[in-house]
Image (cartoon, helix red, strand yellow):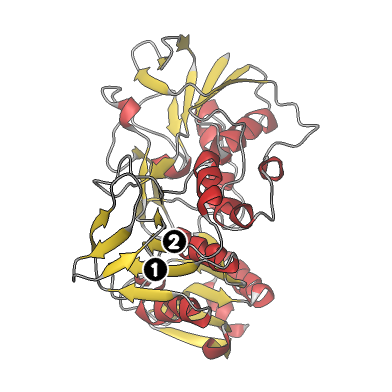
């Protein structure tokens, strides 16, 4: 019987793991260790309503006011070492915690742009503190350059434009979001920038940021110089797994697990976006950074750790799903596309930024994309979750 379980990571995946432990009748000690000083909070609004001032920090809290999980929170002190031999966790303040089971949910951090350390006005966005710092810099009339046109970059650009900043987005790829959505649909979503007066430059990298103490311009590889009062770097994230060096855990772009969260070490599971997990729907091991995965997968990892006979799964929870809100448009995607999968619009009009598109492979649907089509998207997403994919064609 495991009498003490440590959850390393106190964001959504960590909180979901704590809830799952209690839901699965675990009555032992739970210790939750978090590098940030804040209690678990919701990250998606950081690039949207929190930046615009529509939400306050208190509105982001994930814990319910009357929720009592009986968790010992150790916040503001990151874990720096895991010893598999005696199953102990060492914290940055020198404390050592011995446990019977470990749930690794340390998440990821924003990838910085090399050579920009110490330059004022340059931001990444991953944490509440990041968002607080960025929000104070988003003053109307200022010139913002966003480096990276992925979902975070696009959402920041959208929020900043609503605050009346002059916004330019720079993307090294020829088409933003092509990896996730494909070139055709990526180009349609990228058109939202131009619709709202945001300049989008694609197919060009950043050479350097100019400025002495504060950023003054972004210089591109083709020689273009973009004056900038504020810069946001949105070039991806990297998993927080350095503290696991020499632990014996298999690390390959994240903590390697199977579909249930099991690692190569007994008594240690991993979940959330620090884990590279096998996904039956995609047939591959991937690191999933999306909110829904961090909400749902910890219950499976907890069942694995506790040795439950059958790991609980929500129907179809293996089907990847993510969403993004940009310029008043809700973008939703479910499934998994691969290069060469044809896509067709089955409802609506891309020019009106309201449509639903279906990706197919070998004559069957494998993914759906919706822009401002929440009801229709939900219906198709549910059908993707069923074993009988043929049911989609009959909708």
The residue under label 1 is 169
Q: Tell me which residue sits at (53%, 90%) in the image.
A: 351
Name the secondary structure under disc 1. strand
Name the secondary structure under disc 2. helix
Q: Position of residue 128 (x, y in %)?
A: 55, 41
The residue under label 2 is 153
Q: Tell me which residue sits at (63%, 16%) in the image.
A: 28
Q: Position of residue 373 (x, y in %)?
A: 64, 77
Query: In the picture, residue 338 is in which quadrant?
Result: bottom left
The answer to whether residue 361 is left or right of residue 41 is left
In the picture, which quadrant includes the C terminus?
A: bottom right
Q: Nearer the viewer, residue 312 or 35?
A: 35
Tag 2–tag 1 contact (CB < 8 Å): yes
What's the distance in space between the residues labelled 2 and 1, CA to CA?
8 Å
The answer to whether residue 140 is left or right of residue 176 is right
Instruction: In the rendered view, tell whether residue 331 sits above or below residue 267.
Output: below
**Number of numbered discs:** 2
Q: Position of residue 254 (x, y in %)?
A: 33, 40
Mark sitting on residue 310: none
Residue 43 visible here:
yes
Q: Nearer the viewer, residue 388 or 312?
A: 312
Q: Tell me which residue sits at (19%, 70%) in the image.
A: 223
């Amino acid at each position: 019987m495991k009498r003490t379980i440590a959850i390393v990571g106190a964001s959504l995946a960590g909180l979901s793991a704590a809830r799952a432990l209690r839901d699965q009748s675990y009555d032992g000690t739970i210790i939750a260790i978090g590098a940030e000083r804040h209690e678990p909070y919701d990250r998606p609004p950081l690039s949207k309503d929190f930046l615009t001032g529509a939400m306050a920090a208190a509105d982001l809290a994930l814990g319910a006011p009357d929720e009592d999980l009986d968790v010992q929170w150790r916040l503001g002190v990151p874990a720096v070492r895991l010893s598999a031999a005696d199953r102990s966790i060492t914290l940055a303040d020198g404390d050592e915690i011995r446990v019977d089971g470990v749930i690794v949910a340390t998440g990821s951090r924003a990838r910085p742009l090399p050579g920009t350390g110490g330059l004022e006005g340059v931001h990444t966005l991953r944490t509440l503190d990041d968002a607080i710092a960025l929000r104070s810099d988003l003053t109307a009339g200022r010139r913002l350059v966003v480096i990276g046109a992925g979902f975070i970059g696009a959402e920041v650009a959208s929020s900043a434009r609503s605050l009346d900043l002059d916004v330019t987005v720079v993307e090294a790829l020829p088409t933003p979001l092509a990896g996730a959505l494909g070139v055709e649909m990526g180009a349609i979503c990228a058109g939202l920038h131009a619709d709202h007066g945001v300049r989008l430059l694609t197919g060009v990298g950043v050479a350097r940021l100019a400025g002495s103490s504060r950023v003054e311009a972004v210089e591109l590889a083709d020689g273009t110089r973009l004056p900038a009062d504020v810069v946001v770097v949105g070039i991806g994230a990297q998993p927080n797994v350095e503290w696991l060096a020499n632990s014996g855990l298999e690390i390959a772009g994240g903590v390697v697990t199977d579909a249930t969260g099991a690692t190569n070490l007994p008594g240690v599971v991993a979940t959330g976006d620090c884990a590279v997990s096998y996904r039956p729907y995609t047939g591959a091991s991937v690191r999933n950074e999306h909110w829904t995965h961090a909400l749902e997968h910890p219950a499976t990892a907890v069942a694995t750790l506790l040795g439950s006979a059958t790991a609980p799964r929500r129907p179809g929870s293996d089907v990847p799903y993510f969403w993004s809100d940009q310029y008043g448009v809700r973008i939703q995607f479910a499934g998994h596309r691969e290069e060469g999968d044809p896509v067709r619009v089955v409802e609506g009009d891309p020019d009106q930024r309201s449509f639903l598109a279906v990706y197919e492979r070998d004559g069957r649907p494998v993914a759906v994309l919706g822009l401002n089509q929440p009801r229709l998207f939900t219906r198709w997403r549910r059908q993707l979750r069923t074993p009988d994919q043929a049911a989609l064609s009959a909708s």
